[in-house]
Every structure is written in structure tokens, then in C-alpha cells.
């Protein structure tokens, strides 16, 4: 009886009938899974046997590579992907939470539950999608475990300390969990994060057998994922995007190559006298807050200090870094040439590989793959900036995007030609920096509200 009423109401009102479950995707859009393999450099699949990645080229979309934002670090880059904002706009400017006045520094993993580091006004896609009636989840994805304007992601798992990154059985279990979220609980959008191959890239280096072994493991996991999707009956209604946050390069060390002169900053500046706050010894990128009146002095001393070190005053950072307009960005920015770590006082650094270097270096580029019912098959996409993934995800789910710095221009061709016919309520993407107009989501909410009134009225009449 009730179902009959709903159907009658739908027909009378002409609204979209949004079944609650049974594989029927709200608004006719398919579900979406965003997978990030941390530190998966764009060419990691080219020197190892990767049958599943190779098969995926035929079954979906591959970009030769994509470019992370400046700076090429885990939390800042992941947050650009999930918000479509440049780092200076979303405010997660480093892996560490810090305060350059109080000198507070909190390590990367510990930031994962600290809303104050992430919640700066740029809404991540989980929250925007939820506000438009979708159900979303984050499995270890950076930024998924905190609140945005008091609102939490519907379901968020945060990686605990000391968890090994390379446990294949656990990876498979995590995939099974995500599949159940879709099939048993009707989640629409899930982000799934893996800590590899970043860990092995740091500890062993990117050009090692150990890294190749991890890529083989990731490839097997991709095969497992595809079988799991089929087993759970999601092949025809789940789109999948696989990407990363940055690449990886081998750190240059004098002990391996006598021509290398490693950067040790206190050879050129006296930290105690000149520097109030420092973020260095963290790969190829660093920031300094000078003591009062010492900015020019630091700049002058570092400017030509080392042939492989580039120093910027905050106001002179190149515009295409999109890394200046934020109060968390410090007065002096340091970037090492590819492979040159920024050491402060001594070389205490043990990593064999790292990132944080310039995003135009090929070693910092990362993978992009996509497959599912809405993606073309055997389609090679041109390289693009990862800031554009957000608009694509919104389009795939019929979500009206929040203001963002991305565009569909670079990704729209990946979609099947009849995408807009299959999903006729596709929203128009908003332009950069503009206010999102009342759109698709709000219209849906209004439709549902009117529908409820109509059903109620009809119930009374009958
Ligand atoms: Zn890393």
C-alpha cells in the first residue's frame, strides 16, 4: 500500500523515485570508490610484472601520469584530491600540525583525529555529498577521521599507530569490508587508503627489489578487488578511481656519490639567533619563521648558499605553486633540488627515498587509473593536475560541487559518451572560486520534502 502511494506520488509529482536500496543508486548515479596508494609513482608498474594493472588499461582509463599539488606531501595532497582546492586554500599545509608561535608540532599520524588542522572552511567531498543525501565513508584516508563544521563523515576508520603497511591479508579484508559497506549498508562513496608503496619507498628507496615486490603485491590486491567487485554484484554500478598523493625519489648522499654535497642549513645560518620556528629535516621541502626583523638576513644568507637549494620569501613564491595565501605558510620557503633533503644541523636523516620535491619533477608524478560503468574502456588520458579529480568525482555521483579550483575539462572525455543521457540530472560544475548556486542536491531535498507532503496528504485522503 505504502509503496503504491510512493509510486503514485512519484508519477504525479514527476520527481525522481529514489529507492532506498537493493543496488538501486539514488538519482540513477553509480557508486564511487576512490583508492589511494600512498607514494605510487607514475612509472612503478613499468619495471615489474603487473598483469592486473595491464588488464586495467584495456578495461578502463589510464593517464600516463598526474601531477600532485605543490607541496608533494601526504596530507596536503590527499586533501587537495578530496576538496578540489589548492593547498593554500584548504589550509592543510604540511603533514605535521604545527603552530609557529607556540612552537607546537604534532606528528603526522597524530593529526588524523585533530579537526583543528583540517577544518579550515574547505569542505571535503564526504561532507558535501552527505549534505546532498549520499552516504559516505573513509577507510584510513587522511582527513576522513575529523569533523568539519561539527559534522563527521558517516563512517570513518582511522589507522592506528604501528600498523604494518604491507599486510596483504589485511588489505584483502579491508576490501571485503568496503564491499559490504556498499552492498549491505548502501554506502555511495568510499575512500580507501593504503600506506604502501610509500613506506617501502622511504625505507628501502624507489629503485629497489623491495619496492618492486610491494608493487606486485598491490597488483595482486587489484586483482582481488576486481574479483570482489564481481562477487558482490557491483560491476555495473560501482566506479573506481585509483590514484596517489605524490611520487618518490632516491635521496642523494655523499657516501654513495662523492660529488653530492648534502644540504646542512646551519652551515649558512645560525638557527638560535635567526630562526623562531622551523619545519625542516622532512624531505625536500621546508619552512622557517624568522625571529623578529631577521627575515631579510636569513634570506640573504640562504639565497646563494647551496647550488641545490632554492629559497623564497613567502611573497615571492611562484603563483603556480598555489602555496602562499595562507597564514600557516611561513615567511621563508625552502625547496631542495630533486633528491636533496633539507637537513637542519646534521645529517640524522635515515630515509633512502623521499618526496616533498618540486611537483614538476617526473619522480614526483603519480598514477591515475579508473574503471567502472561510467568510464570508457582502453582510454589513455592526457596528464593533468590532481586538483581536478574532485570535479570528476562530483560529476560521477551527481553531487553539486562546493567551490573548487578544479575543472572537468581534463577528465570529462574519460566518461562514456552517453554519460549525460544516462544521468540526466548531472549538475553544471561551478566555476573556480564562485559560490555554489542552489543546485541539484537542494533541488532533490526540496523534491523529497514536497513529496513527503504529498504522500501525507494522500494517506489522509485514502
Ligand atoms: Zn611519504
Image (cartoon, rainbow, N blue to C red):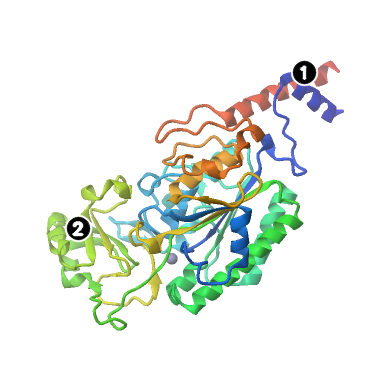
Can you tell which quarter of the image residue 30 is in? top right
Q: Is 253 located above or below residue 68 in the figure?
A: below
Query: From mark 1 to mark 2, how far is it between C-alphas?
Result: 68 Å
> Pointers 1 and 2 in contact (CB under 8 A)?
no
Q: Which residue is mark 2?
A: 290
Check disc 2 and report its element: helix, strand or loop. strand
Instruction: Please state the horizontal and vertical placement of residue 252, each as a whole percent of the image.
Output: 32, 75
Q: Is residue 393 left or right of residue 170?
A: left
Residue at 52% in and 26% down: 438
Q: Which residue is mark 1?
A: 457
Instruction: Please state the horizontal and vertical placement of residue 244, each as a whole percent of the image.
Output: 49, 58
Residue at 68% in and 36% down: 28
Check disc 1 and report its element: helix, strand or loop. helix
Q: Is residue 150 visible?
A: no
Q: Is residue 454 left or right of residue 65?
A: right
Q: Is 107 located above or below residue 99 in the figure?
A: below
Q: Is residue 180 visible?
A: yes
Residue at 54% in and 39% down: 128
Q: Is 163 located above or below residue 76 in the figure?
A: below
Q: Quadrant of the N terminus?
A: top right
| Labelled disc at residue 177 | none
Instruction: Please state the horizontal and vertical placement of residue 385, each as a whole percent of the image.
Output: 42, 49
Q: Is 351 located above or below residue 173 in the figure?
A: below
Asked whether 191 or 44 is in front, the reply is: 44
Tell me which image quadrant ligand 1 sits in: bottom left
Closer to the chain start, of discs 1 and 2, is: 2
Instruction: Please state the horizontal and vertical placement of residue 85, each as a whole percent of the image.
Output: 42, 44
Q: Is residue 323 left or right of residue 366?
A: left
Question: Does the Cβ of the disc 2 residue fall within 8 Å of ligand 1?
Answer: no
Amino acid at each position: 500500500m505504502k509503496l503504491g502511494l510512493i509510486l503514485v506520488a512519484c508519477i504525479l509529482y514527476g520527481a525522481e523515485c529514489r529507492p532506498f536500496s537493493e543496488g538501486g543508486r539514488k538519482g540513477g548515479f553509480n557508486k564511487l570508490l576512490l583508492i589511494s596508494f600512498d607514494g605510487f609513482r607514475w612509472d612503478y608498474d613499468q619495471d615489474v610484472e603487473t598483469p592486473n594493472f595491464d588488464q586495467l588499461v584495456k578495461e578502463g582509463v589510464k593517464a600516463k601520469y598526474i601531477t600532485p599539488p605543490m607541496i608533494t606531501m601526504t596530507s596536503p595532497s590527499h586533501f587537495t584530491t578530496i576538496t578540489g582546492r589548492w593547498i593554500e586554500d584548504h589550509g592543510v599545509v604540511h603533514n605535521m600540525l604545527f603552530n609557529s608561535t607556540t612552537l607546537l608540532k604534532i606528528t603526522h599520524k597524530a593529526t588524523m583525529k585533530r579537526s583543528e588542522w583540517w577544518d579550515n572552511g574547505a569542505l571535503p567531498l564526504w561532507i558535501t555529498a552527505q549534505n546532498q543525501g549520499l552516504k559516505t565513508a573513509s577507510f584510513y584516508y587522511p582527513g576522513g577521521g575529523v569533523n568539519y563544521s561539527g559534522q563527521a563523515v558517516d563512517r570513518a576508520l582511522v589507522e592506528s599507530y604501528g600498523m604494518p603497511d604491507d599486510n596483504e591479508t589485511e588489505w584483502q579484508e579491508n576490501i571485503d569490508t568496503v564491499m559490504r559497506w556498499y552492498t549491505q549498508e548502501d554506502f555511495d562513496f568510499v575512500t580507501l587508503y593504503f600506506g604502501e608503496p610509500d613506506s617501502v619507498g622511504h625505507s628501502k628507496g624507489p629503485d629497489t627489489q623491495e619496492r618492486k615486490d610491494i608493487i606486485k603485491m598491490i597488483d595482486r590486491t587489484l586483482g582481488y578487488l576486481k574479483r570482489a567487485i564481481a562477487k558482490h554484484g557491483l560491476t555495473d554500478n560501482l566506479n573506481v578511481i585509483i590514484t596517489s598523493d605524490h611520487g618518490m625519489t632516491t635521496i642523494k648522499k655523499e657516501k654513495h656519490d662523492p660529488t653530492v654535497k648534502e644540504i646542512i642549513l646551519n652551515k649558512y645560518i645560525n638557527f638560535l639567533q635567526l630562526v623562531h620556528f622551523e619545519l625542516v629535516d622532512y624531505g625536500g621541502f621546508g619552512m622557517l619563521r624568522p625571529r623578529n626583523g631577521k627575515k631579510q638576513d636569513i634570506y640573504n644568507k640562504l639565497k646563494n648558499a647551496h647550488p641545490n637549494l632554492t629559497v623564497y620569501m613567502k611573497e615571492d613564491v611562484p603563483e603556480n605553486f598555489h602555496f602562499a595565501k595562507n597564514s600557516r605558510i611561513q615567511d621563508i620557503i625552502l625547496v631542495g633540488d630533486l633528491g636533496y633533503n633539507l637537513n637542519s644541523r646534521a645529517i640524522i636523516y635515515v630515509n633512502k627515498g623521499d618526496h616533498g620535491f618540486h611537483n614538476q619533477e617526473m619522480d614526483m608524478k603519480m598514477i591515475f587509473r579508473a574503471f567502472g560503468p561510467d568510464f570508457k574502456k582502453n582510454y589513455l588520458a592526457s596528464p593533468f593536475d590532481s586538483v581536478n579529480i574532485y570535479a570528476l568525482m562530483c560529476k560521477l555521483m551527481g553531487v553539486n560541487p562546493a567551490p573548487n579550483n578544479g575543472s572537468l575539462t581534463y577528465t570529462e572525455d574519460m566518461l562514456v559518451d552517453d554519460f549525460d543521457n544516462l544521468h540526466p540530472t548531472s549538475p553544471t560544475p561551478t566555476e573556480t572560486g564562485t559560490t555554489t548556486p542552489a543546485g541539484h542536491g537542494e533541488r532533490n531535498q526540496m523534491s523529497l520534502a514536497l513529496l513527503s507532503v504529498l504522500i501525507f496528504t494522500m494517506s489522509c485522503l485514502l
